Image (cartoon, rainbow, N blue to C red):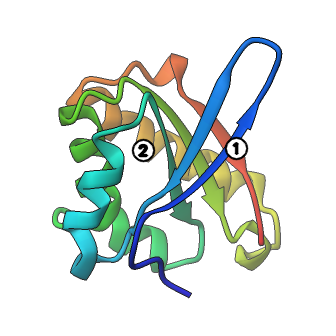
Amino acid sequence: GITIDIALGKFETSKYYVTIIDAPGHRDFIKNMITGTSQADCAVLIIAAGTGEFEAGISKNGQTREHALLAFTLGVKQLIVGVNKMDSTEPPYSETRFEEIKKEVSSYIKKIGYNPAAVAFVPISG
């Protein structure tokens, strides 16, 4: 499903107090996304690996580009990229597809100010 409102989750470690902010990614709820992102120290950008889905998000007016740019502009200087739906690549869990996405996203986030070498790219599914 899609997230409409911001949802919060909290936990503590021996060194940190962590608040997870789940902000909407859908274009119709961008104001809510900005509200959540503006409070963050680190963003986790979830990107769909499926053929066509990734390409739509990284295209000139795509949500992936918009969210990465907004996060950086709002002062979020730490970024983690979750490459989701790796089970739907051809073949499933394709390392080639993951590396292709990583290369293209790295190129874009470098242009907006992130250091791709400091960004973790994590293949995920589910």
On screen, residue 108 above or below 65: above
Tell which circle, 1 or 2, labels the residue nearer the N-terminal end.
2
Camera sees residue 59: no
Q: Residue at x 46, y 68 (%)?
A: 54
Q: Position of residue 9 (x, y in %)?
A: 64, 52
Q: For this view, does 89 lie left or right of residue 20?
A: right
Q: Position of residue 41 (x, y in %)?
A: 43, 28
Q: Residue at x 42, y 61 (%)?
A: 23
Q: For this view, does 114 lie left or right of residue 111?
A: right
Within-10-Å neighbours for mark 2: few <14, some 14–19, many 20+: many
* Numbered label attached to residue 105: 2
Within-10-Å neighbours for mark 1: few <14, some 14–19, many 20+: some
Q: Which quadrant would residue 4 be assigned to in this image?
A: bottom left
- Circle 1 sits in a helix, a strand or a loop, which is it? strand
Front residue of this view, candidates 1 and 107: 1
**In the rendered structure, which amino acid carries the disc numbered 1?**
Val
Q: Residue at x 62, y 56 (%)?
A: 83
On screen, residue 34 above or below 105: below
Residue at numbered disc 1: 122
- Circle 2 sits in a helix, a strand or a loop, which is it? helix
Camera sees residue 27: yes
Q: Position of residue 35 (x, y in %)?
A: 26, 53
**In the rendered structure, which amino acid carries the disc numbered 2?**
Val
